């Protein structure tokens, strides 16, 4: 006895009909989803200054000194400065984000 399921058991017409209904259902679901405005919005910043519409941090050049490392993953406990939290963030999410490093040019 063979373990394969022959096409003739259902009939080629029935398989074609099932595929047609499946494709039609997927198309209708897609159209309804697009027209209803359903979207999957992901918020990257989940805890820093959520009450503000836009966050902008200002650092004077005189305060930078030789080098400053700024967070870009929103996970740092010392935000806006980096504390290395992106390492765990990258491992958890598969992301590859790193800090913004600002330093004086060496002459």
Image (cartoon, rainbow, N blue to C red):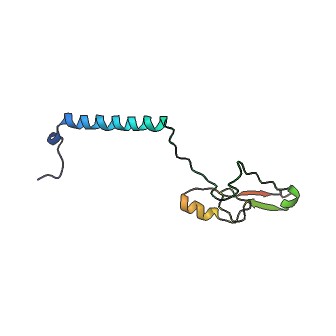
Spot the residue most to the left. Answer: 1
Query: Of residues 92 and 96, which is closer to you in this image?
Result: 92
Residue 80: which quarter of the image?
A: bottom right
Total marks shown come to 0
**Quadrant location of the C terminus?**
bottom right
Q: Residue at x 88, y 58 (%)?
A: 62
Residue 22 higher or lower than 103, as above or below? above
Q: Residue at x 40, y 38 (%)?
A: 29
Query: Of residues 100 and 73, which is closer to you in this image?
Result: 73
Left or right, 78 with respect to 107, comes to left
Residue 64 higher or lower than 5, as above or below? below
Q: Residue at x 48, y 37 (%)?
A: 36
Residue 76 higher or lower than 55, as above or below? below
Left or right, 16 with respect to 56, comes to left
Left or right, 45 with respect to 69, comes to left
Residue 82: which quarter of the image?
A: bottom right
Spot the residue most to the front. Answer: 51
Where is residue 38 shown, x and y percent of the image?
50, 41
Where is residue 49 shown, x and y percent of the image?
70, 56
Query: Of residues 11 and 36, which is closer to you in this image?
Result: 36
Left or right, 97 with respect to 23, comes to right
Where is residue 58 shown, x and y percent of the image?
81, 54
């Amino acid at each position: 006895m063979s373990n394969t399921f022959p096409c003739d058991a259902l009939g080629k017409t029935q398989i074609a009909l099932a595929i047609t209904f499946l494709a039609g259902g997927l198309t209708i679901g897609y159209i309804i989803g697009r027209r209803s405005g359903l979207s999957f919005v992901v918020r990257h910043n989940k805890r820093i200054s959520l009450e503000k519409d836009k966050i902008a941090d200002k650092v004077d050049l005189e305060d930078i000194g030789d080098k400053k490392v700024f967070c870009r993953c929103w996970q740092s406990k010392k935000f806006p400065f980096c504390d290395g939290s992106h390492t765990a963030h990258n491992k958890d999410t598969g992301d590859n984000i790193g800090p913004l490093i600002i330093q004086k040019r060496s002459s």
